[in-house]
């Protein structure tokens, strides 16, 4: 049976949010939440009847905040808001991201400070439960005053406009509602504003980035350990005592993982007394580099979880006598850590590229370009060109969008976060990292084969065996793009990490740390 999550009451983590999106957990509104939502709705009705000016309820929006709206037009005002703000352009965002937007919006509105109708929340949950996901263009948000354009597109289907994906196909929203015997909703005072004010576009990208970057970090340690074995590097730099002297959480975690992964390795033990004093930094400094990226990830996870449980629309309704027009919709608290995380992710690729280059140099007993027939065959010369290209592309993507601001709304919104760009850009960096890691995995498996008959440890050997199940040892030149794509699929579909985890459980090897989970 699926687990249950109570919107507006329970604490929402990244893992639970993803589980709701994937159908492993069901989100619902309990009686406590429904009472709070109804009470907030009644307070907004009182404001309308009193005819005191409250932003977005009986006034215009943005620079039109001084324009009064009659009580009779308050509903039309909200419908016009969704229409006029639907100005997104570009390709639709991934369906999972749009679904995460729906989930995070419900949780924020269900806190009971937004004046939303219970019926409206229930309709959004219907979209989640039936996997009928609105079409949301990827570009058009400046990340302040809420993610206005993407959220407007996200909620057009509530009023029978826009388009949705249902059963893998795109349809007009009105048609899908009709097929399910549903009618478009009317919007009450403040509902349109409550729907489109908020950070859920930025937040959804952050939620998914926390998961994806965590996977990339775990893969980086595993593949880095395989590369170290292929290069006959030393595990001494991963000694716990060393890292207690500089006790960053991420550094200690990576050092412990590498130490655990390499403990009692035949390959490591075979050269304990060799005359190599120090390894290159790309091997020796994995705890410091991978660890720094993990520290950034921890910060992103912490702030994402705060945002997941926050109210981010405007104005906030404490009561009909107490409303505050504030700035909880401003995306800067997530924009900066998303940009920081992009740098952290890019560094995983940077150091991986250096290890690929190191393995191709013909040092430490490895053949040049990891082939016995260099000359007639180019071997693994050119895949490193691809890592170099991707590393450079990532460097260009590391410019912080949050460092920029372009005033909007006739100057009323004179500082914006551009966090929507930060979120999308981080995913582009992670896309590239996953290909870089696939290429390093190709190099590392090949290098390890030149150390046979020596074996590594159970987890590393399981990872190597998985590679060889899909990509054979390289004797002659072939179309290496096919190999790269095979390994990329193993990384992105979870097979690589699942294989490592299974081997660790089987051999009672602990690679986990609660600080670095997503729940």
Image: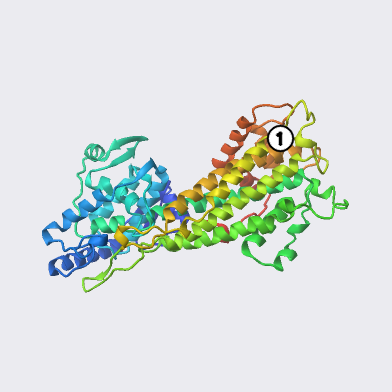
Q: Residue at x 67, y 59 (%)?
A: 288
What residue is at 65 percent from the left and 33 percent from the top?
Answer: 469
Q: Quadrant of residue 249?
A: bottom right
Q: Horizontal and vertical percent for residue 401?
A: 47, 55
Q: Residue furthest left?
A: 72
Nearest the viewer among 469 and 388 is: 388
Q: Which residue is mark 1?
A: 381
Q: Is residue 29 above or below residue 154?
A: below
143 lies left or right of 15: left
Callout 1: 10 Å neighbours few (<14), some, many (20+)?
Answer: some
For the image, the number of numbered tags is 1
- Residue placed furthest toward the bottom: 321
Colouring style: rainbow
Residue under the point 49% across and 60% down: 336
Q: Position of residue 255 (x, y in %)?
A: 69, 58
Q: Is residue 62 above or below residue 168?
A: below
Asked whether residue 513 is in view, the answer is no
Q: Secondary structure at mark 1?
A: loop
Instruction: Name the side, left or right, on which 150 lies relative to 229.
Output: left
* Residue 105 at least partly seen: yes
Q: Nearer the viewer, residue 347 or 119?
A: 347
Residue shown at the point (24%, 39%) measured from the top left: 180
Q: Position of residue 196 (x, y in %)?
A: 30, 55
The one nearer the camera, 403 or 483, is: 403
314 to 202, vertically: above or below: below
Task: Specify whether 62 is left or right of 2.
Answer: left
- Expressed as whole percent of the image width and height from the top left, the position of residue 508 reads 67, 52
């Amino acid at each position: 049976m699926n687990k249950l999550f109570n919107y507006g009451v329970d604490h929402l983590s990244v893992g639970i949010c993803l589980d709701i999106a994937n159908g492993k957990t069901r989100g619902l509104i309990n009686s406590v939440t429904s009472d709070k939502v109804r009470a907030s709705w009644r307070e907004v009705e009182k404001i309308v009847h009193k005819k005191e000016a409250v932003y977005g309820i009986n006034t215009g929006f943005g620079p039109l905040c001084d324009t009064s709206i009659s009580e009779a037009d308050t509903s039309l005002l909200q419908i016009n808001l969704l229409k006029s703000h639907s100005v997104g352009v570009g390709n639709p965002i991934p369906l999972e991201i749009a679904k995460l937007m729906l989930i995070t919006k419900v949780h924020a509105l269900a806190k009971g400070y937004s004046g939303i109708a219970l019926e409206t929340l229930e309709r959004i949950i219907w979209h989640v439960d039936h996997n009928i996901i609105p079409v949301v263009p990827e570009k058009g948000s400046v990340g302040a005053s809420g993610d206005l354009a993407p959220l407007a597109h996200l909620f057009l289907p509530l009023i029978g406009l826009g388009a949705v994906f249902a059963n893998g196909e795109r349809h007009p929203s009105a048609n899908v509602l009709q097929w399910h015997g549903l009618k478009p909703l009317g919007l009450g005072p403040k509902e349109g504003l409550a729907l489109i004010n908020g950070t859920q576009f930025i937040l959804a990208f952050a939620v998914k980035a926390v998961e994806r970057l965590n996977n990339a970090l775990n893969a980086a340690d595993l593949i880095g350990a395989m590369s170290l074995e292929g290069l006959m590097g030393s595990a001494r730099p991963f000694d716990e005592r060393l890292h207690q002297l500089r006790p960053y959480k991420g550094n200690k975690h990576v050092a412990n993982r590498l130490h655990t992964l390499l403990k009692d390795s035949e390959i490591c033990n075979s050269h304990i007394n060799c005359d190599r004093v120090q390894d290159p930094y790309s091997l020796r400094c994995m705890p410091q580099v991978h660890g720094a990226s993990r520290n950034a990830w921890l910060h992103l996870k912490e702030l994402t979880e705060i945002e997941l449980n926050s109210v981010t629309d405007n104005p906030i309704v404490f009561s009909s006598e107490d409303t505050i027009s504030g700035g909880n919709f401003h995306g800067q608290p997530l924009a900066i850590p998303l940009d920081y995380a992009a740098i952290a992710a890019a560094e995983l690729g940077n150091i991986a590229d250096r290890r690929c280059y190191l393995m191709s140099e013909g040092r430490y007993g490895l053949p040049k370009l990891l082939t016995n027939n260099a000359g007639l065959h180019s071997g693994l010369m050119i895949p490193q060109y691809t890592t170099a290209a991707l590393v450079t592309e990532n460097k260009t993507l590391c410019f912080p969008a949050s460092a920029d601001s372009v005033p909007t709304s006739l100057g009323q919104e004179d500082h914006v976060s551009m966090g929507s760009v930060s979120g999308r850009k981080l995913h582009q960096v992670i896309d590239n990292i996953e290909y870089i890691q696939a290429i390093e995995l190709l190099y590392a498996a090949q290098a390890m084969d030149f150390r046979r008959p020596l074996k590594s440890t159970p987890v590393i050997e399981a990872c190597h065996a998985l590679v060889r199940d899909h990509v054979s040892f390289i004797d002659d030149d072939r179309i290496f793009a096919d190999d790269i794509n095979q390994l990329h699929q193993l990384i992105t579909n979870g097979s690589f990490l699942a294989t490592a985890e299974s081997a660790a459980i089987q051999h009672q090897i602990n690679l986990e740390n609660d600080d670095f989970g997503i729940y």
